[in-house]
Image (cartoon, rainbow, N blue to C red):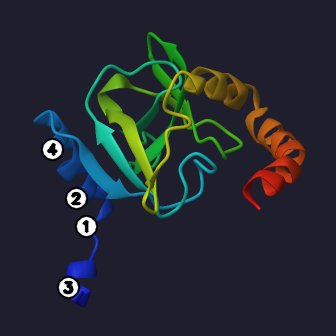
Amino acid sequence: MTNRAKRAVSGAGFAVLMAAVLEKGVPFRFTAAGYSMTPFIRDGDVITVAPGRIRFGDTVAFLSPRSGKLTVHRVIRISRDGYLIKGDNSLEPDGIVPRTNLLGRVVGVEHGSRYVGIGLGVERVAIAFLSRRGWLIPVIGATWRVMRPVAKRWFA
């Protein structure tokens, strides 16, 4: 692959491109960058965003009102003013995001060649609830400490 083929579209240009594709009703795939949605979306995962109704617990792509950057985080509350959105691995919410800033919702996550469905189904409601309270990361850590020895025996 040449250097030219590896060049990324700028943040603002990327958001405009995504919005144009989603406006046509076509899903948009791209590689996630960052760790704010770990462990459900990891740096380097390929995510698919599609247009559609946004519900509590959905992971959404939006333009941050604070920074103007394209961001992918989870809806942890819905109000008349917009959506309270927070990264699963973030300490603080992004604040209230107006409906007009939302581009679409994440409908697929691929880690390597594996499809990752956790965090996109009905469990998204529990994840959003735990995230809003600041309990998500401690619960995941405690669960992993308990399940790790069992998982080692199963997959050894």
Viewer-nearest residue: 10 or 135: 135
Name the quadrant containing residue 92. top right
Residue 9: mark: 1
**Mark 4 falls on what kind of element?**
helix
Residue 63 in sight in this render: no
Q: Which residue is mark 2?
A: 13
- Mark-to-mark CA distance, 2 and 1: 6 Å
Q: Secondary structure at mark 3?
A: helix
Q: According to the image, label 4 marks what residue? A: 21
Q: Earlier in the sequence, mark 1 or mark 4?
A: 1
> What amino acid type is highlighted by mark number 1?
Val
Instruction: Kindly identify which numbered label has been placed on residue 4.
Output: 3
Number of other residues with Cα within 10 Å of mark 4, as a class: few under 14, some 14 to 19, many 20 or more: some
Looking at the rendered structure, the kind of residue marked 2 is Gly
Q: Within 10 Å of the Cα at label 1, are there few (<14), some (14-19), or many (20+) other Cα atoms?
A: few
* Residue occupying the point 50% across, 45% down: 116
Alpha carbon separation for disc pair 1 and 4: 15 Å
Horizontal arrangement in the rendering, residue 52 relative to residue 4 (left or right)? right
The span from disc 3 to disc 4 (Cα, nearest Å) is 23 Å
Q: CA distance from mark 1 to mark 3?
A: 11 Å
Looking at the rendered image, the quarter that the N terminus falls into is bottom left
Query: Residue 18: x percent and y percent?
Result: 23, 48
